[in-house]
Amino acid sequence: MAEKKPAGTVLVAGAGISGIKAAIELAESGYKVILTNDSPQIGGILAKLDYQFPTDHCGMCRMLPLVGREYASQYCMRKSLFHENIEIMPFTEITAIQGDAGNYKVDLLKKARCIDPAVCNEMGKCIDVCPVEVEDEFNLGLTKRKAVYQAVPHNTPKMLLIDKQACTRCGECLKVCPTNAINLDAEDEPETREVHAIILASGVKLYNIQEFEDAKSYAVSPDVVTSLAFERMLSGTGTYQGDVIRRPSDGRPAKNIAWIQCMGSRNRRQKREYCSSICCMFALKEAVLAKEKGGPEVDTTIFYMDMRTFGKGFQQYRDKAVNEHGVNLIRCRVQGVMLKPDGNLQMRYIDPDTNEFFLKDYDLVVMSTGQIPFETHKKWADLLNAPLDERGVLATEKSSKVKVADKPGLFLCGSLMGLTDISEAMVSGIAAAGEASKFLATLGVDKMQEEEIPEPPAQSRELPLVSVALCQCGEKPGAEGLDYELLSAELKRHPGVDAVHTITSICKAEGETELAGLLGKTKCNRLLIGACQPFMYRRKLKNEARKAGFNSSMVEIFDLFGIARRGMVESANGDWTLRAARDVKSDIEKLKYKPELKVSTLPINQSALVIGGGIGGMHAALSLADRGVPVHLVEKEAHLGGYLGNQLEHTVDGLAPMAMATAMKLRVFENKNITVHLNSEVEKSVGTLGCFETKLHSQETAENTYLRHGAVILATGGHEGATSEYGYGTSDAVLTQGELKKGLASGDLDLSEVENVVMIQCVGSRQPGGRPYCSRICCLGAIDNALKIKEKNHEARVFILYRDIMTYGFYEQYYSQARSAGIIFMNYSLDDKPEVEFVDGQPVVILTDPVLKEEMELNADLLVLSTGVDPEESNKRLAAAFGVSVAEDGFFAEADSKWRPIEFQKVGLYLAGTAHSPMPLRSVILQAEAAAQKAYTYLSGREVHTAAVTSTVKDALCIRCQRCVNICPYGARSYNEADKRIDIDAAECQACGMCAAECQNNAAEVRGWSDKQLMAVIDAKIMDSTLSSLGDGKSGLRQNV
Amino acid sequence: MAKFAKVSFKKDELNKELSKFFKGMLSNGAVDAVLTPMAQAKKGVRLSLVTSAAHTAQVDPFAPVAAVSGAKIASSLTARPSGRKVAMVLRPCEVRAVVELSKLKQVNLEDTLLIGMDCLGRYENTDFAKFQEQGGTSESFLENAQAGKTATNGFDITGACKICEFPAADKVDMRLCALGAESGAVYIEALTEKGEQALEKSGVKGGGAPAGRDEAVKKLAAARTEARDKKFTDIRAEITNFEALADKLAPCVNCYNCRVACPVCYCKECVFVTDTFRHTGDQFMMWADQSGILKMPNDTMFFHLTRMTHMSLYCVGCGQCTSACPNGVDPMPLFRACADKTQARFNYQPGRSVDEELPLAGFKADELVEVTGQVK
């Protein structure tokens, strides 16, 4: 036998959402992942947020894989993460990194928890007796916790630990611990791991006002809180358990709440010349939530410098917050907060509309605190011996946001790129995983090998005979207070139960042997196992059962200790074992009527179709082709390059799109895995993940080509918007930013005589009747052009008339640079737009002077309009051809704006770049890389397993009313006209059960969740006559009615 | 807009005159077939499918009886269509059920010419036999009913008809109008282009519109709406808890006739006769064990509540459920009173329009948040 190489292993340092996403992506591609985190829990900042805009719900679980669900535990992500290929190491620090590309040695330090999670039964008796109280960092110090504590209130398993710093070693906990899980002398344990690649996802530190001089002027009362603390005040698990928002100082409901933006950010004096990117949306969302929690009478005001609503849907959310919820926005940097004797917080501000000073009292002030990245970057640079760039952060390759410069095998994602919102964190996590996977492919390392255990036949048609195996968790039964004898006797009486066994410790090797022995001689055809944390052991125990000849769908595992604990809460008087028995009986009933669940495999055509031959499309194609995936690249024009690659010489951040496109074209045409189809458009496509067939029409030859492929990437790009405003088209002196850029690059534009250049931003954008969205790149484009004009003619005066300057993140430096270069920025508002008149053919711009509030005129030699970015017209046709949707604004509608930004509701299709929304080039490339990785996850395998639990149609019962087709949120159901029946796409189906609820005679059913099973479960639950609430309270539904 | 043709008739010749209309349509190729109530050889009136112009003499569209719901027949004829054009003469409640069934893909309206008749009510099957024995005819019924006299020797029109606020059919191609017509005349009204063409081809024409019709329809609808609301008040006062409901349903023997008769209960096989409800002996014993006793057959209220859940949004109030019950259960008012609330919640009126979306039949991310408890 050939020697087995170790599987490709990647260390993901940091288990916030981007790290988790990167880990899941790699694990799904078949690689081994070690996921470490400094703090005792995972989930990062997002574990603290209950609500995320635009839905104002949580949606973290949407980052879990959708296909092949059998192999990844589907579980609430805010509680925890479980995946076969991911080893999670919370509370673990990285102390040293040695080695080089493909061969890293990482020294880890596992911090002492002092409580062994394998032994702890999580009852929390230690917490009750612990006398030490310290500030709870999870609620940002708004509440207290003990020295023995649970790091995240909603975590599962609870993973209790002891804060060694706070612990007084009084020993009270040792006395009450029933399982001897506590060791106060536990030491930190060092460990060394070898990995092939490293993804840094640690996030960065957040600005803590107490460490800075600002504290004196702002942090004057406990009622001045950070935006993250405010999030905990809103949370259902937070300080007020989801009740109305109160002031921390005296508990009074907060009726007037103000937000101060840019705390710690955009501050040149303090050497933090960047924007933290996420705070504007964060504040808007919090203000909306405050209104929703406290009612419309709660007054919410955000004091801001620029409201940076640059991302997809951001501007629309702002409009809704202002127009529908009545959130006040005041453009003013407030210089401090005053604490009045009555406890109120007073702020002094200038009303930008009137230039008058106001004094106003607030109950609560929220500081939108941003990031302070340099410390974290310095730490990583030292550990990795990697250079920092001139901004003081880890240098990445020029066009990539995730590849660390000159360090192959080293990647970063998430807020290390600069604070990212959820959507970009997701994209960067996927992209980093993609780059890591490409890197692993060059090393030639293996993927994880799965042990294939053949599935024995199911005896699902025989009369059910159930064997119950209860884990007693240790030598002595009853540690939880559960009376195993009584429970067993009670269960044995239940119809269909043949035997009830107890097993010492099912999670240990002895337990496995015990279980195997038991299964070897049973005559039962179904097996119910009671243990703890079924989500962790389900796969393993099912495999054990399979080896013993049990079909895995005939085996169920339930959370015995969860039941035990619930029983304790419900009744104190001893009969709770019987109540626990009732719960177990309902599990028995569900198992009794369970059908055989089969996992089906879909063959994968291991090739991809990329639509759009711009830089994004080419990048995605190359990313896949470099990993050996054949790609068809379709472009509707006669040449590759797209808008940027053919029109744009350079960008403000130093990229050269045209040169880049030229180089990429060469690589594309040289790559034997890529087939380019120019002058071609998609007319029709049928099929689903793994097997699409697409009809391509060539404009040139008028011929049709039929392509077969396994996945689709839509990278259709966009183009500069058209306008007829401000006299465009009537004078040569009025041009768009794109035209100016071209003129500057070619030198055709003579600037020597030019005295005044006026630029108007947001032409046709962010307004009713126009583009409702911000085009994100125009402010950068205008600044770039303005700087170029200044370079060529230093005497020229450049005015930029703007509404909000959208230089988010490190782009802020170009805004500063522009102001230093003497470019004049003048703010205008939507209800007082500038006007243009022509005098002797020359444009004169009339506007209100933002400082003096008087009308002024600017004679413009050049009037330059930022006309935004429009989506491609072809998006609608493509959406119809592929069965996906286009949003009202004409860009593709992704599955979920936060958690699945580059996916569609339909699996197998991905989107990248401006097809999603307008974005700068580096973001386009990031998305393209991520889209390629999503496609690669499936295309790298020959087949994909569908979930066992999917919906089905009982054809003989189906009347073809097609209500199930309309109700399916995933488009998994369709009516087959030819065969006159309902078809189900098992890969699309997410088993949500909408169809089963809609179908009246159960012709549509989710396997394993049939009405028959569920009614039996309900019957068992209401068996205890005192619990029946129907009718007279003495009888169940079925008795006398 | 609407075009009328007057059909004048001498005493006892209403059907004779009307048959000319159907004969004209069939012989001139306006339609290939007509589904209409027809007098049977000996007695009784049944819907019949006529494909030959020679067999139109027995038509009796205004007969105050509906042995089965015409909507069910319409579904049988068109769900898997013949490709031939059919004119269907249906009561307003049947038309409304047809509209629902077309949305549920159980009726195909493509080759259908819908003809609604003005309905003053119907007698139960057995009562209609008595009515005929006593010499009653459609003509006499129309005349008496217009004067408010529907009750004769010990029987009356059904409870459902008494509280039906839709005496005239909307959303049809043509209408047979009796309401507000002068004595000795009925009118044929064409409401759509399809209807106008058919009317023209039938050869019946002239005579203007019935002057008092709108007024008469409005008046009748108002009187019945008042009766309906009173019925709702009564039934809601009567059925205030599960016991009262159980008492009301006590005579039920789970024969499921009400479900068979219901025009909008459209499942191929009701869930109550599928494996889902084929229980094992163990289960019956378990249920009996709970309180020591189990009424058999069981699941009676379960059945009615389930059916109510399934069809109350589409309930057109035709009363066929009550008519079909062999044991005197009167489900109609229960179902109508419930439907009144569910339909109001979605501002939905079954039969109002083919284009109106069925409630709860499409995926919406934010719907019924007050019920789902979704945090906003």
Image (cartoon, coloured by chain):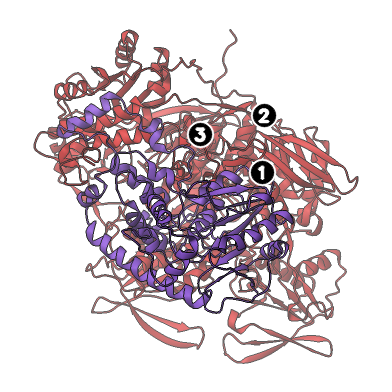
Specify whether A522 is left or right of A198.
left
| Label 3 chain ID | A
The amino acid beneath tag 1 is Ser
| Nearer mark to the viewer, of 1 and 3 | 1
- How many numbered callouts? 3
The amino acid beneath tag 2 is Thr
Residue ID for mark 2 = A442
Asked whether A327 or A1003 is in front, the reply is: A1003
Is residue A386 shown to the viewer in this render? no
| Location of residue A551 by image quarter | top left
What color does chain B have in the rendering?
purple
Specify whether A294 is left or right of A604.
left
Residue in view at x 56 percent, y 64 percent: B14
Specify whether A789 is left or right of B16.
right
Q: Residues within 10 Å of mark 3 (few under 14, many from 20)?
A: many
Q: Which chain can be seen in red?
A: A
Q: Residues within 10 Å of mark 2 (few under 14, many from 20)?
A: few
- Rendered image: mark on residue B82: 1
Q: Residues within 10 Å of mark 1 (few under 14, many from 20)?
A: few
Let me know if marks 1 and 3 both belong to one chain. Answer: no
Q: Are marks 3 and 2 in contact (CB under 8 Å)?
A: no
Residue in view at x 36 percent, y 33 percent: B277
Q: CA distance from mark 1 to mark 2?
A: 64 Å
| Location of residue A946 by image quarter | top right
